Amino acid sequence: MFILIIGCGRVGSTLAKRALERGHEVSVMDVDPLSHERLDRDQTVTWEDAGGRFTVGTALEISALTEAGIEQADVFMAATSGDNTNLVISQIAQRRFNVPKVVVRVADPARAAWYSEQGLHTICATQVAIDLAEQAVLGAA
Amino acid sequence: MYVIIAGAGKVGWNLARELMTRDREVTVIESDHARFRVIEEELEHAAQYGDATELWVLERAGIQRADLVIAVTGDDEDNILISQVAKEKYGVQRIVARVNNPRNLEHFKLLGIQPVVSATDLILRLIEHEVPEYGLVQLLALEEEHLEIIELEVGEGSHVAGRRVADIVLPEGVLIISVLRNGLGFVPKADSVIEAGDQVLLILDPGLESQITFRFSPSEAGSSI
């Protein structure tokens, strides 16, 4: 599978490394060139030598998405730090580029819930944390 | 009519003022606290502090009963989100969204958000209006209604120059609605004669421009018809 990940933070970079280890083709894009460092950390070879791709670009720029390989992507993961950016680019991936599988990270549980009803595959770490905290603090309901 | 404005920058603040002087009920939502304090001095309870991309902030502002939502923050992703949620989740009938970066216009279109207002676009159209060598000026596009109004200058020796309106060959779906001559406009009748140098306003189905412009151009292509 060809996986395109937008946002090279903790989530994006770790997911990218795991995907590459599991034999997938991986392309990562971030606005910050320095974020590339996360892909090399704790690795014996560099990200590029290991076969990964990294491009610098803004997610709303169609040319940047194209350069990162969105037209070939089987999976698109929106993992920037901005909820609204993630929600907009994932809909672009879905509706304009017809990427078969689109996953979007959303921090706000309310927005995550509504957009998931609209057919986006949202992942909300905040909701997971709330549920885990509830269990830890209050015990099983 | 109840109007919610997201973003209290220069555009949002002045819109709120204008609408309030016209006795509209208005709420302006601003996420920057310092900015909010400034506008609250003047707008009082019509100003609310919060991030308008958060659903509870929109609900607190009463989005369920809003007739119009205007998304004019400085961030295009936010404006897209606010408009999309207003329209699709809360069923707001009318939205107006601001495009900050004209390159993002296609994203607004892709996600069905319209009408949109882009300052760059507006200024560009004004320039085109002032610099007639561009030939065609698009004055108004009503996309949902499938109509647009354009302005064309009548070239010397063109097909239309010196012809009566009734004798001008135009495709189906195009109508001459007004003529500007020497700075004055009039609505032409069938026997009005169009002259070179006139500015003609036409209403048409979108996409017909290419079948019209050559009839107004001074080239041989126009005069040989």
Image (cartoon, coloured by chain):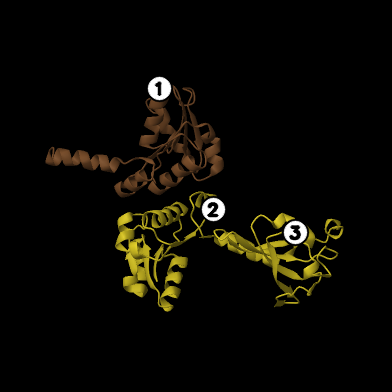
Chain letter of disc 3?
B
Decide: few, some or many residues near mark 2? Use Cα within 10 Å; few <14, some 14-19, many ≥20: some
Quarter-wise, where is residue A79 in the image? top left
Chain letter of disc 2?
B
Q: Is residue A15 above or below residue B81?
A: above
The answer to whether marks 3 and 1 mark residues whose Cβ atoms lie closer than 8 Å is: no
Same subunit, tags 3 and 1? no
Disc 2 marks a residue whose amino acid type is: Leu
Chain identity for the colour brown used in the image: A
Residue, disc 2: B105
Residue, disc 3: B213
Front residue of B54 and B196: B196
- Residue A58: image x %, image y %? 50, 44
Which quadrant of the figure contains the C terminus of chain A?
A: top left
Q: Is residue A28 above or below residue B31?
A: above
Disc 3 marks a residue whose amino acid type is: Thr
Which one is closest to the eye, mark 3 or mark 1? 3
- Residue B116: image x %, image y %? 52, 59
Same subunit, tags 2 and 1? no
Which one is closest to the eye, mark 2 or mark 1? 2
Disc 1 is placed on an element classified as helix
- Residue A3: image x %, image y %? 45, 30
Closer to the N terminus: mark 3 or mark 2? Answer: 2
The answer to whether marks 2 and 1 mark residues whose Cβ atoms lie closer than 8 Å is: no
* Residue B172 placement, left or right of A78: right
* Residue A106 placement, left or right of B76: left
Disc 1 marks a residue whose amino acid type is: Glu
Disc 2 is placed on an element classified as helix
Q: Is residue B193 above or below residue A66?
A: below
Q: Colour of chain B?
A: yellow
Mark carried by residue A21: 1
Chain letter of disc 1?
A
